[in-house]
Image (spheres, rainbow, N blue to C red):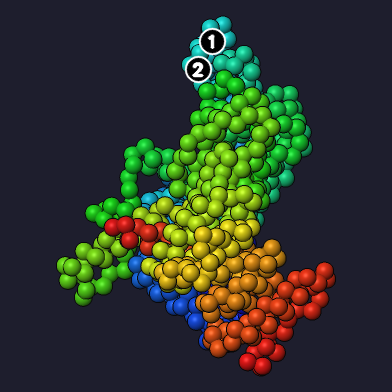
Amino acid sequence: MGDDQLVERTLAGDSGAFETLIRRWSPRLLAYARGLVPHVAVAEDIAQESLLRAYRHLATLQQPGQFGPWLLSIAHRLVLDWRKAKARTEVSWIDSSSNETRSIGADQQNSQNPHYACERNELQKILHEQIDGLPEELRQVLLMHYFDNLTYDELSDLLGVSKATVNSRLAKARNLLRIRMSAVRSER
Amino acid sequence: MNCELFHESLSAWLDRELSDASLLAMQEHAAACTSCRAAMEASQSFHELLSQELTPTPLDLDRFCQRVVRELPKQEILLPTNRGVLQSPSSAEASSNATMSPAIPLAYMSVAALVGFVAAWWMASLYFRPVVPSAVAKSESYEFGKVVELIPSPSIRYPDNGIARNTVVVSTSLHQHTPPSGSDVSVLVGCTVQSPQNYPCELTTHRGATVRMDQQTEVKIESEDALQLKAGRLWYVSSDQATAEPLVIHTPLARLQLADAECHVDLGEHGLIVDGLRGIAQVTLVNADQVKRQPVDVEAGERLHVDPMQQVSKGTIDPLLLPSWMDKVAVLPGSNPDDLRRRVASLWEQLQLEPKSEVYAVELRKIGMGCSQELSAFVCPKESSPRQTAPNEQPRRELASMILADVVDFDSAETLVPLLLDDNHVVRYHAARGLARVAGHGSTMSPADWQAMTSDQCQAAADAWRRWLADPHHEVAPQLRFLKKKA
């Protein structure tokens, strides 16, 4: 059943139809939010609030077939609101003491070596600082690609850009990151 | 496949997104070209680092969906009224029942009359109350994709001479919504925004850019960054609301800060262009890292040029922060040679830290564009002849000659010909390669070939290229393959 039919059934009072929409769009919605927000928990909250807000305002959707893009745009708005609030409170996602930060690939054996762990923490810190400093469109595609293992096709579909743009943004993100990381590491 | 295409394909190769044919071509090129192979290995190792450090976070989708579904019963779908206002179904039903009920209890009518009286008194007090300077205009946010009617309310007085200003907060995207006919104003999110027929309104994008639209203005939101004026005038409203400067903005890569408010502007082929300002405006450039530059005064009709070499008349942007821009922008003629030398020297230091990085190779070529004269001076310093150059200068000369060769600038040809006689065989090789590229064909000779060539053969090659340069039609390019056979 298409999104438009599910929207109409939801408006007719069938809440099960919206449940189907939730299950259909949650993976992409979460991936989208996680690409914009570094905190996993915050991204999930934003995704949830997007779905609930979409549900409340479903009657205003002019083209029911456009439910997905409409949902993502709601998420985008919420992310911006979150950023404004974050700018006021100055919460850094790089804070390694926070449990909410992105999970880092952990090498259990080596992490027991204090020297290795220290170096690794430093590297992670630099990496995350530099990722945080990337232009938004580059950061988003980079995080979505690595954190959510999304292919070029999936990224292109999700972001509404061509595969060539995805390719170019990823290449730029990596190049920029390499330049900045090598510069920072040589400084320290 | 050439080196440029190879570097362009590296990212797709890392992500296994290449076709079989492209993959094969890359492998063949990597086998033949040592610098590209090194770039490939460096990219691979950085990709592995990222893959290792940015591991996918496990996602419990079922748990998430259940969490949302549990919240659903607490929500209700809001219904739109004929004024575009949303209300809950229960209140909509109540009001509907009230109007349709034939018999309304007397007590209910009394309460309604009382409420009506209080409301009328309140509105009257609002209307006759003096304007409070600090009053804030009514501001509402609308959901994405919603077509809204902006109706100035006569009962509310606004700070700016009683003109109703409605702020429409729009999230942009790229799909279309068709406006219903007859609406006062159509907010076509992601498509076109039209001003109301008879009063101005403000448009705020999600990035914080604010524009005030005059009558009959139509603004097209092309992408997340771009606001394009279609007709009429686009007014830029500074944060203090005291003055509104008309501003024409082209293209969307950087951010321009005018007074205290922000908007997005474009970097044209030759940098940032701002015109249409009335009077003098103070402009602060903010680059992608949010670093603010020194503010500069821009006068009406003046153009603000920014180039990647930071030879900027009014402002500057770090080229490293705008890599996509670098693909389009050439160094403007007249760049400061000292700065260029400093930059090449600095990049050379970086190159030693990270040998043969494709990023630096690309960047160095960009430096070369339009700077053949400066680069030529770098290869052949005027103060000393090539043969007397200090030994530690040789690697830099080789680098500069490589850039000259990669630039494919016809004006560099005259400089390259004498370099065919240079003592350094790598410089000779790059000079020959550059000349071949200028002439439109590839060179099959390696640095080792040029090392093996005698001075007579080098002289013959230089003479052949001089003849080619002297030929007004440049029809017969020297056959270096033939020279190689003779060697």
Report helix, strand or loop for mark 2.
loop
Crowd class of label 2 (few under 14; some 14 to 19; many from 20; radius 10 Å):
few
Total of numbered circles in the picture?
2
Q: What x and y, as percent, mark residue B95?
A: 58, 28
Amino acid type, label 2: Ala
Q: Which mark is residue B88?
A: none
Question: Viewer-proximal residue, A94 or B413?
Answer: B413
Report the Cα–Cα distance between label 1 and label 2. Answer: 8 Å
Q: What x and y, as percent, mark residue B167?
A: 58, 30
State which quarter of the image contains the N terminus of chain B.
bottom right
Per the image, the residue denoted by label 1 is B131
Per the image, the residue denoted by label 2 is B135
Q: Residue at x 43, y 40 (%)?
A: A84
Question: Viewer-proximal residue, A13 or B290?
Answer: B290
Say if A52 sits above or below B328 in the image.
above
Q: Let me know if marks 1 and 2 both belong to one chain.
A: yes
Instruction: Please identify the quarter of the rendering in which residue B226 is found.
Output: top right
Say if B268 sits above or below B193 in the image.
below
Q: Is residue B41 visible?
A: yes
Say if B227 sits above or below A171 in the image.
above
Q: Residue at x 76, y 36 (%)?
A: B231
Amino acid type, label 1: Val
